[in-house]
Image: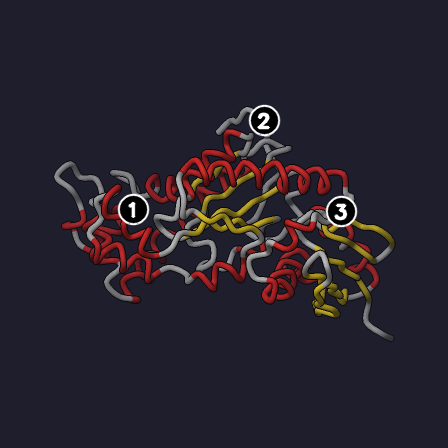
Amino acid sequence: MPCPRHAGGGAPGADSGGFATLVDVIRLGLTGGIGAGKSTVAKTFVEHGAYIIDADKIAREVVAPRSEGLAALVAAFGDDILGADGALDRPALAAKAFADDESRTTLNGITHPLIGARTQELLDAAPADAIVVQDIPLLVENHTAPFFHLVVVVHADEELRVQRLTTLRGVAEADARARIAAQATEEQRRAVADAWLDNSGTADDLAEAAAALWEGRLVPLEAHVRARTAAEPIAELVAADPDPAALPARLTNRLWAIAGEKATAVDVTAADQNATGSVTELTITARDAEAAAALTDPLADGGFAPVETGVHRSCDPGRLATVRVVTPAP
């Protein structure tokens, strides 16, 4: 998927978590409930140079006719989920798969591993200096938020989403509400969101907000990560945090994703408010001195630039965060 901003070479291999293998690639997680407007935001990001990986597109690809995924779905849910042409009848599958938790678990157990494998292939093919935007409807439900430099949530109220699904996509109202109910709540999305795009207006309004986010936050974040420099906080970005009370937990989870087995603890040592917004200080206790030294590069690659030995600050102008790396007391 070439984009106007980047050309050439492939990215280093990247696993589904951690930043150590993503030295050159900036990863942004884009999510939101069904009917919220993610596609508009994704299109805007692509126009600004993003390399997009669309989980919905991959989900369709892995259950295409004659695919391993489609055969597994037929075995689990019956051949009445097929249309006359042998392709998947998505409304027929949805009526069965979203009927109860057990059916939904069966669906996810079939499709998620296939989607993950294809996603990995696309990550491996990303240009070496890419900003990779992964459009993932179930990012919250799959607990993958900590593995991104930034998570953007697109939001619209439930009734507006139901209206869009029924009038624009032809989904039956009962099915639309069942799908919405099966996804994460607004509170759960706010807890993992670094940026929140409201889509209660027009598509043009949303595209304008997405473009402003790209230029005002993502471009500076990318520049600081690549230069390994801390960002000066921008007050309006810091103040716009979707859930300041959840910020310490959000950062703790992200640091665990970066540090992995090199750490024995990640603790919040300060979480305060000042005139700019939420200020969070965290401490990573490294396994030993060797592990502490080895954390410098992963932290920088993950968006926390070294400012002095054992001290890192956020590369994101929308986040006031300091991270200290210590070793266990003798």
**Residue shown at the point (72%, 59%) measured from the top left:** 275
Mark 2 or mark 3: which comes first in sequence?
A: 2
Distance from label 2 to label 3 (Cα)?
A: 25 Å
Give the residue type that dot 3 points to: Glu
Task: Of the two numbered discs 2 and 1 on the same chain, state the one appearing first in sequence.
Answer: 2
In the image, which is nearer the foreground, mark 2 or mark 1?
1
Q: Within 10 Å of the Cα at label 2, are there few (<14), some (14-19), or many (20+) other Cα atoms?
A: some
Q: CA distance from mark 1 to mark 3?
A: 40 Å
| Residue count near mark 1 (Cα–Cα under 10 Å), binned few <14, some 14–19, many ≥20 | some
Specify few, some or many for label 3: CA neighbours under 10 Å numbering under 14, 14-19, or 20 or more. Answer: some
- Residue visible at 73% across and 41% down in the picture: 224
Query: Percent from the top left, x then y, of residue 175?
Result: 23, 56
The reply to whether residue 272 is in sight is yes
Residue 256 spot, x, y in % from top left: 65, 61
Residue, disc 3: 232
Residue at 26 percent of width and 66 percent of height: 100
Q: Nearer the viewer, mark 2 or mark 3?
A: 3
Residue 316 vertical position relative to residue 128 in the rendered view, above or below: below
Q: Kindly identify which residue carries mark 2.
A: 5
Pointers 2 and 3 in contact (CB under 8 A)? no
User: In the image as oriented, which residue stretches furthest toward the left?
Assistant: 84
CA–CA distance in space, label 2 to label 1: 32 Å
Mark 1 = which residue?
164
Q: Secondary structure at mark 2?
A: loop
Look at the image and tell me whether residue 264 can be seen.
no
Q: Nearer the viewer, residue 22 or 234?
A: 234
- Mark 1–mark 3 CB contact (< 8 Å): no
Q: Is residue 126 left or right of residue 255?
A: left
Q: Give left or right: position of 36 versus 84.
A: right
Q: Is residue 266 left or right of residue 76?
A: right
Q: Amino acid at mark 2?
A: Arg
